Image: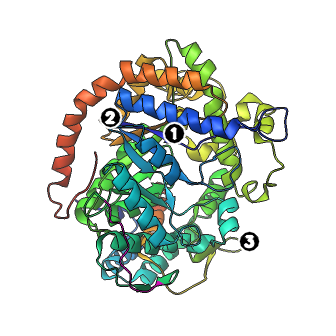
Amino acid sequence: MKFGLFYELQLPKPYDADQWHPDQEHRIVKEALEQIELADRLGFDYIFIVEHHFLEEYSHSSAPEVFLAAASQRTRNMRLGHGIVLMPPPYNHPARVAERIAMLDLVSDGRVEFGTGESSSEMEMGGFGVRREEKKAMWEEATRECLRMMTEVPYPGYEGSYFAMPSRNVIPKPLQKPHPPVWVAASRRETTMVAARLGIGSLGFGFETPDEARERVEEYYRLIREECFPIGKAINPALAVLSVLSCFDSDEEAIAKGLEGAQFFSYSLGYYYSPFTGGAHRPGRVNLYHQFKDTPPEQRWGALAEWFRGFAGYRGGFGEEPQDEVGRALWRAAQRGGCIGTPEFVRETLLRYEQAHLDVMLFVAQCGARKHEDIMDSLYRFGTKVLPEFKERHEQHQRWRQEQLAPVDYPIVSSI
Amino acid sequence: MAGKVDRIQDPELRASLQAAQESLRKGDYRDVVQRSAEAFVELLRRRPELLQGQEGVRRVFMFPRLGVDLVVSPGSPPTLKYERERFSFSEAVTYLEFATEQLLQAGA
């Protein structure tokens, strides 16, 4: 199993102010770049960063290609992932996406992971005029054509349902041939299966539990073998899921420095993605962090907590502790998060994903009002005390993967 | 290796989704969407208790609204409302996977 960091660039407002302090956005970007530099030196394999628009406090990453370009000059080995590019043409014209991905691939010496997605928050779709019922068809059309633009000389032109353009040679072309590994954001199980059938990686933003991950891995690789119709010129068989990381020498310290950030991540996500609150947001006039802090602790996982029950080990409910051993262990994990704990606790949790043959675990480390120093400390501890043994075993996973993919005839471009 | 559709016990619903799978291979995405959505609605008509409580709300909420809408009103059986005729591959797979998973979860 490989490991990466996943960034939203979260920026809660000060509890007692209407707006951020003038230097806060600058500071969070510089700190994130420092964290990524450290992670690269420690041997983390990936950084993925989102593209979101207008989701105040939840994500201030609306131009990930700029951030990744900066990261490419501060890191040596780490893969640079879009997690994801919003593909519906009202957000980004497919030719502009092809150009930007190719240029990033060139400046990074071929380290790009091309994550794609369709968006689902009302703030974003409404802001750019994307209709919910058409966003998936838009994603598919734009992604397919974008990959043709990266590989065909010239691109012959296209008259589609959602965009049209005449024949042009879209340049530059990416360094990785025929194109960088392609992924799709999969917050629903169905999208993971779409990914398998189109031969692309699944970035599981649904926060699967290890058991769910195991089921999805098996079905995903079966579909890759038996029912795959590649959307690009090469396939990227790969499954990644998210968890939250806070790794310290004691559970108490990990909880004290990491739990609230994880809860704010879940709370703010629930706020923007809930059908009841997401569309009703008053731009520039809400202090989400203030609301969060005033919420009783048992409700701080937010409106959609049940839908994201794998996240941070959360399984829903703060009722009475179960009596049976397994139930009690899971209940306790729920209180502190799947990867919030000592290196030993984090290792035990990750072993279950490794046994499920997950390809990549992505950590949300920067979230809520966590302090930069604590994030660096946690990354260092994980990178020195947990990561090495998983890296040593990765060869075994690669062998398992080769067996799974033995019957597949398509070219494979993958960093797993 | 058999796919998940083959694990559906109910012969009528299984046959419907097997036909949807076949249509997916042939590129008839509208047929995939129609057969998958109707199999799910048929399940709800036979098992109205699946629409009750928090799980029922969640089931309705999670129905993919990608050109076909699920209409649920008190006292009436659920119905489908088609908003367009053409569907993409990924939309077809989404409806097929959703229906398959829901039927299996319900023990159909």
Tell me the element at label 2.
helix
In this figure, what is the number of numbered marks? 3
Q: Quadrant of residue A259?
A: top right
Q: Which residue is mark 2?
A: A354
Chain identifier of the residue bearing label 1 in the image: A
Badge 2: few (under 14), some or many (20 or more) residues near its Cα, within 10 Å? Answer: many
Q: The disc numbered 3 marks a residue on which chain?
A: B
The answer to whether the residues at label 2 and label 3 have Cβ atoms under 8 Å apart is: no
The amino acid marked with disc number 2 is Glu
Type of amino acid under label 3:
Gly
Nearer-the-camera pick, A195 or A38: A38
Q: Judge whether residue B56 is colored magenta.
A: no
Q: CA distance from mark 2 to mark 1?
A: 15 Å
Q: CA distance from mark 2 to mark 3?
A: 48 Å
Q: Tag 3: Cα neighbours inside 10 Å, few (<14), some, or many (≥20)?
A: few
Q: Which residue is mark 3?
A: B75
Q: Position of residue B90 (x, y in %)?
A: 43, 70
Residue A313, image x, y percentages: 52, 33
Residue A310 - label: 1
